[in-house]
Image (cartoon, helix red, strand yellow):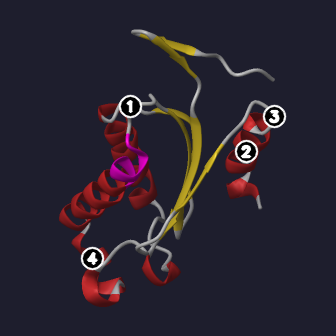
Amino acid sequence: MSKDVTYGRGYVYSLQYHIVWTTKYRKSIFIGAIETDVKNYLIKTLKSLDMNIVAMEIMPDYIHLLVDCKPQLRLSDAIKILKGNTARWLFLNHPEIKKQLWGGHLWNPSYFVATVSDRSLKQVTDYINSQKTK
């Protein structure tokens, strides 16, 4: 499976990242309507960062993303925005969540990120899409 390349002004690129981050203490927060709300909010936020979703799954205690983005994007800043904005938005719209978290922090401070190659793109996409069935 060959990835498509994207043409920018003076450059051609194909950059995909597999990103995973977890809730603090691996608390199962994203259940029912909260899962749907978080997914919709992340879609809007990713779009505002000019990141295209290849695959996404919201698990009860973590987020899985496979995104395509421009080389100008500073990934660490984008992840900080995704985590920070989502936490702030979620606490405003679902204040009951704070009661489940000691100290009021939604996310574990760390995250996982890996680049995805032509050879692994389908494998990572299938892996993310299969998370709910495991």
In the displayed structure, would residue 66 be above or below residue 119? below
* Numbered disc in front, either 3 or 2: 3
| Main secondary structure of the magenta stretch | helix
Q: Nearer the viewer, residue 85 or 4?
A: 4
Q: Amino acid at mark 3?
A: Arg
Cα distance between the residues tagged 3 and 1: 24 Å
Cα distance between the residues tagged 1 and 2: 23 Å
Name the residue beneath numbered marker 2. Answer: 124
Name the residue beneath numbered marker 1. Answer: 72
**Lateral position of residue 40 relative to residue 28, left or right:** left
Q: Secondary structure at mark 3?
A: loop
Mark sitting on residue 119: 3
Label 3–label 2 contact, CB within 8 A: no
Q: Residue furthest left?
A: 92
Task: Sort mark 2 into few (<14), some (14-19) or many (20+) by Cα contacts within 10 Å.
Answer: some
Earlier along the polypeptide chain: callout 1 or callout 2?
1
